[in-house]
Amino acid sequence: MNGNIYITGFMGAGKTTIGRELAARLRRGFVDLDQALAGRLGMSIPRAFSELGEPVFRDAESAELKRLSRRKGLVVATGGGVVERQTNRKLMRASGIILNLKASLQACRSHLSPDQTSGRPLWQDAEALAARFAQRQTAYADCDLSIDVDGKNLSAVAAEVMAGLLPEERFSALLDGKECPVIATARASELLAEYTGGRRTAVLSDRNLARLHLDRYRQALPGAVEVLVAPGEGSKSLRNAEKVYQALLENRLERGEVLAAVGGGVVTDLGAFVAATYKRGMDFVLCATSLVGCVDAAIGGKAAVNLAGAKNQVGCFTRPLAVLLDLAALATLPRRVILEGLVEAYKTGLTAAPALADLMENSLPQLMRGEVLGLAQVVKLAAQAKAAVVSEDFRESGRRRILNLGHTYGHALESHNRYRVGHGRAVAAGMRIAVELSRARGLLDEADAARMKDVLTPLCKGSLAWPSAQEAWPLMLNDKKNEGGKVVFVLLSGAGQPLVTNDLTQQELQAALDGVIKEGSV
Ligand SMILES: NC(=O)c1ccc[n+]([C@@H]2O[C@H](COP(=O)([O-])OP(=O)(O)OC[C@H]3O[C@@H](n4cnc5c(N)ncnc54)[C@H](O)[C@@H]3O)[C@@H](O)[C@H]2O)c1
């Protein structure tokens, strides 16, 4: 996941241009091997080639490649001839994957200016050039992913590469007795067009998404009605729901037509709520673009809007035609939105997917930076686990309660801080308390607790007012997931081993709080 991506191909295939674009789309560093080598040798590549001679030049090139192979998480545009040595190909495979850009000689020539070819003797001898091009093809074919670039523009090639690096994964969630496909994909807009099947469609989204991602959806669904709301929690209101109903009415959307909600949890919650109630229910597809949306909000059939000051008070259980997790959208997520999503993903990992918890414990800094291949892996594991949990308990009366880990104290903390802290940070703090309580009860051993703490501490860092047990208790008793007047609290006896308890005492909670606060890491 954190290996380098080495781009190979003949001179002029577009390795540097595509490499830069790919690095931006994946949020990785970019290195041009030729540029790095020219810097080290203190002369241009054509000059080094002619002054040093090919064998010495190739040795220097291999040494540069070796240096780069020791770094991680890069996109590297290699020189056209790097693949000729099998040892180089082995090195690239051992430290990452090889992506070949396959171009005809004609296309390579058309991408290069006379300036770029004039200093290179090979490009002056058509026969020798064709022979070298033909001779390298076997080495180029020794790759993990090959993309044909002839006749395609930059954005089309980049989209194909992304789809190749982010292969589709399909799960399904059983919602109210029927299967709902959940698909993690870099081609969400194209799949949406397949699901709408030519029916008239309204796309509901927010203005951030309209700027960043809706063009892909517009291309896939030409003529779709567009309804935009302001970004943020404030849009999840009955007033906004009414505005969306009105827009659907004005555009004569009928029950047999489709609403597609493209956005974070706010847009998918609002969209699902409107679709479930407009004309007593119309078909809808959720396209999740935020991390919270992909790992949590869009999966599970819960739709709701807020009432003044109270979240998710009006809503229903419902079932979309499909849930599409838009992996190509992850590259533009702001840091705050990434951290919110990582908290919910870790919660799912700790309660239902130990492999996900493990992945996050081993690659947290890369994930916090928003590296897209890592985030996509988190999305796939979390979505699959959440789909399995909700399939067992659609209406939240049993197993689904494990997903409340961190939320009981987290909600109290949010309310105590007058909702001025993000939900994710509050839940991370709640999970931190749950880990401490589990450790104190002897359910978790010290090593497991320490690993979990290392993930949760950076996720809840910042100024927070932690309510005391006495302050938190009445707030926790208000939680709608409690039963029989007792606080329901999820603890852990290991990753993937949640325990739903109702015997927590105020004294125990205060001791856990004192322990966490005394550590000073929060
Ligand atoms: N239905 C459920 O089961 C469920 C579960 C968890 C959360 N939720 C709800 O989800 C909401 C929170 O979701 P959220 O964190 O996605 O909030 P959000 O929808 O407000 O998105 C956060 C911000 O990120 C932006 N954004 C989204 N995708 C982006 C992208 N690809 N690139 C750049 N910016 C992007 C949005 O415009 C917004 O400004 C809450 O309302 C919560 O109640 C629902």
Image (cartoon, grey):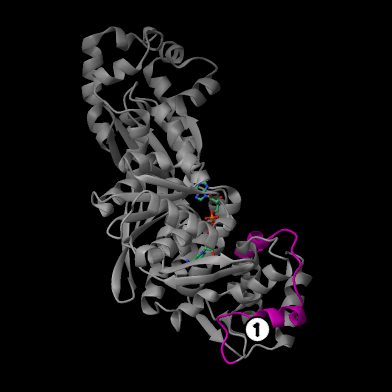
Quarter of the picture containing the C terminus is bottom right
- Looking at the picture, how far across and down is residue 430, in whole percent? 64, 72
How many circles with numbers are drawn on the protein? 1
Using residue 512 as the reference point, say whether residue 501 is left or right of it. left
Using residue 337 as the reference point, say whether residue 437 is left or right of it. right
Amino acid type, label 1: Leu
Q: Is residue 74 visible?
A: no
- Looking at the picture, how far across and down is residue 252, in whole percent? 34, 51
| Nearest the eye: 46 or 279 | 279
Residue at image point 57% right, 80% down: 480
Q: Is residue 396 visible?
A: yes
SS state under label 1: helix
Q: Tell me the magenta residue range.
A: 455-484
Residue 310 figure quarter: bottom right
Q: Assess mark 1: CB under 8 A from ligand 1? A: no
Which residue does the numbered mark 1 point to in the structure image?
A: 477
| Nearest the eye: 11 or 392 | 392
Q: Is residue 482 magenta?
A: yes
| Nearest the eye: 298 or 522 | 298
How packed mark 1 is, by other alpha carbons closer than 10 Å (few <14, some 14-19, many 20 or more), is: some
- Looking at the picture, how far across and down is residue 494, in whole percent? 53, 77
* Vertical arrangement, residue 78 with respect to residue 391, above or below: above
